[in-house]
Structure formats: C-alpha cells, structure tokens
Amino acid sequence: MEEMLNPHVLFVLFGIPVTKTVVSTWVVMGFLVLFSFLLTRKMRLVPTRMQNILELFVEAILHLIEDMSPGNGRKFLPLVGTLALFIGTSDVAGLVPGLKPPTSDFNTTLALALIIFFAVPFYGIKVRGWKNYLKSYFSPSPILAPFHIISEITRTFSLALRLFGNIMGEEIIIAILFLLSPLFLPLPMMLFSIFTGIIQAYIFTVLSVVYLSAAVESSGH
Amino acid sequence: MQGEILFLCITVFTAGFSIALGVMFPAMGQGKACSQALESIARQPEAAGPISRTLFVGLAMLESLAIYVLVVSFILLFANPLLKYVFK
C-alpha cells in the first residue's frame, strides 16, 4: 500500500531516478503517438474508417469548447484536447497488467494542473494584453486582488487533488478487493473505475475550459 | 497506555471517523443537486443536454470535497509522516 503513495525507484537513467509511474507515462505516451501516427497515414478529405475515429474525437472536444466559450474553440483545442486524451488514456491504463495509471501519482496530476495554472495567464495576456489582464485582477474592487490570486492557487490544487484522489482511491479499493477474493470480486470495481476515469478526464477538461475562457473573455463584449 | 499505542489508536480512530463523517455532507449536497436537476429536466425536456452537463460538473465539485477527506484519511493510515517522531 505504501508503494502506491510513494512509488519505488526502478532504475536510474542519466542520474534521474525513474519510478513505475514514469515508465507507465512513457507507455501511455508511446501508445498515443503510435496510434495517432498509424491512423493519419494517407489522410483523405473523405475519411476512411480509421481516420474517422480521430476526427470524431477532435470534433467532440471542439464542440465541448465551443459550447462553453463560443469563438475560442480553435485556440484552446490543442491544449485541451491533449489533456483530455492523455488523462482519459492514463486513467484506463490501470487495467493493463503491469502498468500503474500515471494519474494515480500526485506528481503527475500536479504537473497537469500546473500546466493550466500557467496557461491561464498565458492566454489571458496573449488575447487581452498585459495591462487589461492585470487590470482584471483588480476589476470589481482592488481589495479583491489577493482573493483572486488565492483562488487561482487553490483551484490548481483542487484540480490536482480531485484527479489524484479519484484514481488513487479506485486503485486502493481494487487492491483491497484483491486481498479478499482475487478472481472475480475486483471485476465490478474495475468496470466502475473505467467509468469514473473517463468522467474525471471530462471534468478536468471542462474545468480547464471554464478557467481559460474566464481569463480570455473581456467584460466589454 | 504507552505513548506509541495511544498515538496509533487515535490515528486509526481519526482516519475511520473522518471518512465516515466527511462523506455524509457531500452526499446530501449531491442528492439535492440531482433532485433539482431531475425536476428541471422534467419541466423542460429539451434542455436536458446543458442541464445534465452542468449537473455533472456540480457533482464533481461536490465529490472533490469527499475526495479531500479520503486523501487525508489515506495519508493518516498508509503514509503517516508523524510516525517517525513517535517511533524513534
């Protein structure tokens, strides 16, 4: 059980310790890159069946972003789509024997949340400019500026902790069920963990779009 | 009771009690949110899409409060950082 919260170091590569989480992240990354590479050979305007799968996914994310913040779909699509795809795949990767879902390590989820933490000012400044974006911190009243900053930090932590807690909690429950009755008892929980893994990826994506579009909208429009 | 045994007893009791108490209130909140969402879908079936999306986001926010309690409970049980001060 301790190993789940602090993974052991498997080997050391160029002086950097490599844990089971890092190896699982590489496998998930390799799978996603290989999958996308193989399905985008000979792309045609009228898509083949295999290309359709990827187009379906891209359009789904685009509609999701357009629903929440109309007009910003193309701008946020690379970041948000990558997050959705990576989190969705890594949540389900726990079912592959030998892999540990990378998002069940707090380091991975904190890194993903920090991406959003830095992307929000980046897009805010890129769209609205330095002065307008900084003015938005003081916007209803200057007294609210520290609360704005505190809320940015806490929502980053809450994103990370929500994803970590959900995936790690499922892992621990499955481990406990394995102790009780190994062959059939964990199966319903594993099915349920696919479902909640996809939902957590969806929630992370939706919240990222909400935070990003809040930074990009201007109150003048 | 010796100091270490007392510490272990209180830690385990706190972990169990906090998770039991800490999921009651988010569960009540989630039930209320669901019932309101169902009522408004029944009133306006064509708005079922946005309503259920908003419902899911709201449920996830409430769920995360229970997850905070769960993580504290897990840390107390499995990765307690204060153990090394008690067991010198």
Image (tube, coloured by chain):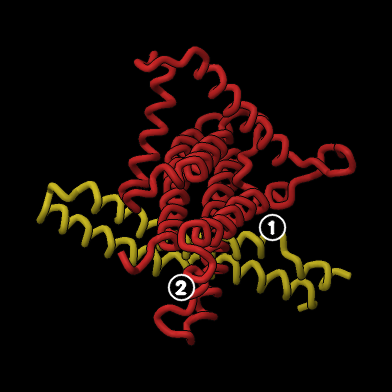
Quarter of the picture holding the C terminus of chain A: bottom left
Q: Chain of mark 2?
A: A
Q: Horizontally, is A195 left or right of A100 in the view?
A: left
Residue B63 percent across, percent down from the top left: 43, 59
Q: Nearer the viewer, residue A148 or A75?
A: A75
Q: State which chain is coloured yellow.
A: B
Q: Is residue B80 left or right of residue A138?
A: right
Position of B38 compared to A50: left or right? Answer: left
Q: CA distance from mark 1 to mark 2?
A: 43 Å
Reply above or below: A26 against A76: above
Assess disc 2: are there few (<14), some (14-19) or many (≥20) residues with their C-alpha within 10 Å of its C-alpha. Answer: some
Q: Residue B15, position in %: x, y?
A: 60, 67
Q: Is residue A130 visible?
A: yes
> Could you tell me the amino acid type at mark 1?
Phe
What amino acid is labelled 2 in the image?
Ser
Q: Which residue is mark 1?
A: B78
Tell me the element at label 1.
helix
Q: Are marks 1 and 2 in contact (CB under 8 Å)?
A: no
Q: Quadrant of residue A180?
A: top right
Chain letter for the red part: A
Q: Which residue lies at the image location 39% right of the left edge and 69% below the top edge?
A: B25
Return the x and y of residue A208 as percentages of the image width and height.
Answer: 47, 54
